[in-house]
């Protein structure tokens, strides 16, 4: 099991949250998980919530899981959740008019590769079926890589 955080001073491996190192007392270097978690703030410079604030529930959640894919623990699980929300967005007829959020999605998508990029661009235009196809392609790629290891 991987440690939750490692003390920068003494290197002690922590397996639970703590405000300071149990070994040497140094303040925790546990990443911020409330206000600015890294998995919702990336190299695009566009925080995930700046996009999802403009979206309806299902589309926003689909985007959220695409956004954080590669930054948390289980990419395949995140992608399956994104696909699930894309299907619901299609069922509910979620549609967005062009606006700031569409520009922001394009900016975020520039920092994504292949199928995730394709899914985000399709999401930008509310092409939910295309979003699901792109997500399923990425899931298949990741599962194939895992089988090869």
Image (cartoon, grey):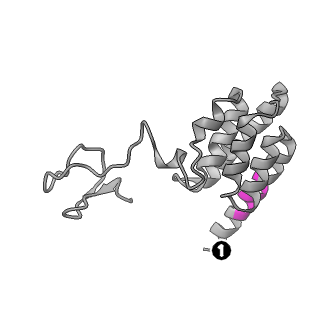
Q: Residues within 10 Å of mark 1 (few under 14, many from 20)?
A: few
**Can residue 140 be found in the magenta stretch?**
yes
Comparing 120 with 3, the one in front is 120
Image quadrant assignment for residue 60: top right
Judging from the image, what secondary structure is the residue with disc 1 in? helix
Say which quarter of the image contains residue 19: top left
Instruction: Classify residue 14 as left or right of residue 50.
Output: left
Task: Judge whether 99 appears above or below 47 on screen.
Answer: above
Residue 47 in magenta? no
Q: Is residue 113 above or below residue 109?
A: below
* Residue 84 image offset from top left, x and y in percent: 73, 38
Image quadrant for the C terminus?
A: bottom right
Q: Residue at x 75, y 62 (%)?
A: 114
**Residue 89 in the image: x percent, y percent?**
78, 31
Disc tally is 1
Residue stretch in magenta: 135-141
Farthest-out residue, left? 24
Residue farthest toward the bottom in the current orientation of the protein: 148
Left-right relation of 118 to 109: right
The image quadrant where one finds the N terminus is: bottom left
Is 5 on the left or on the right of 128, as rendered? left
User: At which x and y percent is residue 95?
Assistant: 83, 29
Q: Which residue is mark 1?
A: 148
Q: Residue at x 38, y 44 (%)?
A: 32
Residue at point 51%, 53% (across, down): 73
Please name the residue shown 74% across and 55% down the image.
117
- Which of the pair 141/98 is nearer the observer? 98
Q: Is residue 147 above or below residue 90?
A: below
Q: Position of residue 65 (x, y in %)?
A: 63, 44
Dominant SS in magenta: helix
């Amino acid at each position: 099991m991987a440690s939750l955080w490692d003390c920068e001073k003494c290197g002690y491996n922590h397996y639970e949250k703590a405000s300071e190192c149990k070994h040497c007392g140094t303040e925790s270097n546990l990443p911020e998980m409330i206000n600015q978690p890294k998995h919702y703030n990336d190299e695009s410079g566009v925080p995930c919530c700046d996009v999802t604030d403009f979206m309806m529930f299902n589309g926003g959640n689909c985007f959220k899981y695409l956004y954080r894919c590669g930054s948390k623990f289980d990419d395949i699980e995140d992608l399956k959740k994104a696909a699930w929300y894309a299907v619901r967005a299609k069922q509910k007829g979620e549609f967005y008019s062009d606006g700031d959020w569409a520009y922001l999605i394009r900016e975020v998508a520039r920092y994504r590769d292949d199928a995730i990029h394709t899914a985000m661009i399709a999401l930008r235009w509310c092409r939910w079926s295309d979003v699901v196809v792109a997500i399923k392609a990425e899931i298949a790629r990741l599962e194939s890589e895992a089988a090869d290891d």
